Every structure is written in C-alpha cells, then in structure tokens.
Image (tube, helix red, strand yellow):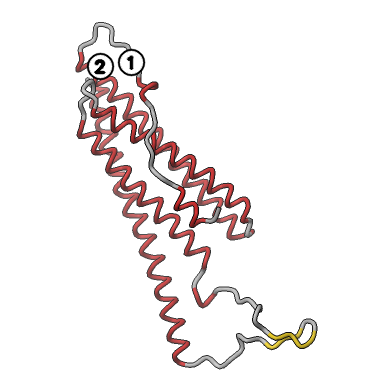
Amino acid sequence: MSAEDFQKKVSIRDSSLAGEMEIERGGSSSSTVGSSRTLVLLRRLLEIQERRAQAYAKLKRGFSEYVETSGEALYQKLCSEITAEFNECSKQVREMETLFLNPDVGRSDLAQLLSDIQTQEKQKLHLTVTIQVLKKAGRPSERMLTHENCKFKKPMQHECVHLHEITEAEGTEEAEADAEFDNALKEAIRGVQDAVTCINEYLEDVRYEIAALEAD
C-alpha cells in the first residue's frame, strides 16, 4: 500500500467504548455519577491522544527509513499498522462524544470539544500524508530520469533522449513546476502546524476541566 492508499484507507468510524465506562452508582447522586464519568472519559481522551502522538512518531521514523533505503514493503506494512491505530483511536473518541451526550453525563460542550479535536486530527493526518507523498515524489527538477525511450547502439552505450538543448520555455516550465511543488509542501507543513496548535489548545481545555473535576 502506497502513501496515497494509506490516505484513502484512513477513515473515521464509530465503535463501542461503553463497556469500559461502567461506574458504580451506589448511593451517589446523578450529578456525582456524571462528574465521575466525565473525569474517566477525559482521562481516557488524553491517553488516546498520547497513542496518536506515538503513532505519528512511528510514522515519521518509518518514512525517514523508507527515503533512505527505498524499502517499499516495510513502508507499506507500516502504513497498514498506522491506519489501524488511527482508526481505533478515532472510533473510541467518536464513542466518547456519544457518551458525553448521554443524560447521565449531559456535557454537550465536551462532546463538541471532542468533535473539534477529531476535525483537526483528520486535517493533520491528511496533510501529513500529503507531505509524505510530495517528498516521495521529489521536486520536478530533481526527479530521477529513466532511459526506457533511449536508443542503444552497443551494450552500455546509448543515445540519451534527455540530452538536448534546454529552451527558455522549458526552463520556465520547470521553474514553475518547482515553485508549485515548493508552495504545496510549505502549505501542507503550515497546515499541520496550525492543526497541532489547535489540538494543543483543545487539550489544554481538557486538562483544565480535569483539574476542576478533581478539585470538587
């Protein structure tokens, strides 16, 4: 599976997390139960975000190794593993959104916060893969040439079709292609940085909420 396939395969699906959220009611009031569940969910969210961070670090290392060694098979295997990990994290967060809307918890504000995090995570992943696709292709002027269409007169000797006088138009076209590539890469990198900033701000809100609940 190529980096492009990796991007297509990553999807956001729902699954069940309710089984993990059983909390003893006893004689506690509904508000106490709701606060307890909220605290458990928010702590769980931070754990999931840590899993995501580890997955990104693994993906980055794997791509660097792929660039150095051109190990396509290992890179494809890594993409499959990371796809499964991101999907699992996303499914659990989507389930948390539903639980926050449950009357026992009644925190639609936190459900919206998780939805916002998911949106930024999806954007971050999309742009991360875009960056890898661009880097894998390389700048147009630096891409390796093939000699499939060259004429071979003798073994190890051929008439290279790539050897010709570069016209001004061709030089301009190549420069424009490089500029377009550079802009696309910079835009993707900037987009990832913006997404990370948003996610960190949301997680700071989560930590404040946890601190407030623990203080009660």
Quarter of image, res 114: top left
**Residue beneath label 2, please?**
33
The residue at the point 27 percent across, 25 percent down is: 38
Q: Quadrant of the C terminus?
A: top left
Q: Nearer the viewer, residue 183 or 90?
A: 90
Residue 25 appears left or right of 86: left
**Given the image, on which type of amino acid does mark 1 rest?**
Ile
Quarter of image, res 149: bottom right
Quarter of image, res 143: bottom right
Question: Is residue 210 positioned above or below 142 on the image?
Answer: above
The residue at the point 44 percent across, 36 percent down is: 88
Residue 2: give x, y in percent of width and height: 54, 56
Callout 2 environment at 10 Å: few (<14), some (14 to 19), or many (20+)?
A: some
- Whether the residues at callouts 2 and 1 have beta carbons within 8 Å, the answer is yes
Q: Nearer the viewer, residue 151 or 37?
A: 151
Q: Secondary structure at mark 2?
A: helix
Callout 1 environment at 10 Å: few (<14), some (14 to 19), or many (20+)?
A: few
The residue at the point 36 percent across, 23 percent down is: 18
**Given the image, on which type of amino acid does mark 2 rest?**
Val
**Residue beneath label 1, please?**
23
Residue 33: give x, y in percent of width and height: 25, 16
Residue 90 appears left or right of 132: left
Q: State the separation of the CA atoms marked 2 and 1.
A: 8 Å
Residue 67: give x, y in percent of width and height: 58, 60
